[in-house]
Amino acid sequence: MFSVDWSSEHTPEHCSHMEHIISVTVENKFGVLSRIAGLFSGRGFNIESLSVAPTLDSSMSQMTIVTSGDDRIIEQIVKQLNKLIDVIKVVDLNESDFVSRETASLKFIRGRRTGRRPCGLQISSALKWWIQPQQPTPSR
């Protein structure tokens, strides 16, 4: 397994009609994700990406939502999220400078007959991706 990591910088002056990353801290309760997804679908907003993970405080979770729209639409989304009971904090990350980072995990299998490096490894070297080799698994 290999991890690919790239990042880009964003500044607020490029935020008129573009992707917005919204950070939402919520109570870690059953149904919260469903209510937030329902808020988006019920108002015709699209969630382009969604990531949810517990925080160090097990009573809360951190949601990262990527959506797109102009400033008026994003402002409406933030206001609607703040109205939900289980939402603790909402932050539109595009309102300040931030670094966006994406990670992809790819698995390349070395050909047994040729012993050559897979094409994916050659591409990753050309693009200067960070590579973490997977330890071989013991055969059973």
Image (cartoon, grey):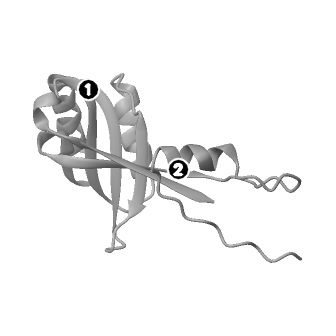
Q: Residue at x 39, y 43 (%)?
A: 35
Is residue 132 visible from the viewing direction of this image?
yes
Could you tell me which quadrant the C terminus lies in?
bottom right
Give the residue number, with chain letter if any, for mark 2.
125
Q: Which sits in the foreground, 61 or 39?
A: 61
Q: Residue at x 53, y 57 (%)?
A: 3
Q: Secondary structure at mark 1?
A: strand
Task: Decide: is 19 above or below 93.
Answer: above
How far apart are labels 1 and 2 at the CA level? 31 Å
**Based on the displayed image, in which of its 4 quarters is residue 88 positioned?**
bottom left
Q: Earlier in the sequence, mark 1 or mark 2?
A: 1
Give the residue number, with chain letter if any, for mark 1.
18
Circle nearer the viewer, 1 or 2: 2
At label 1, the amino acid type is Met
Task: Decide: is 66 above or below 137.
Answer: above
At label 2, the amino acid type is Ser
Task: Decide: is 42 above or below 94.
Answer: above
In the picture provided, is 81 more to the left or to the right than 36? left
Pointer 1 local density, CA inside 10 Å: few below 14, some 14–19, many at least 20: some
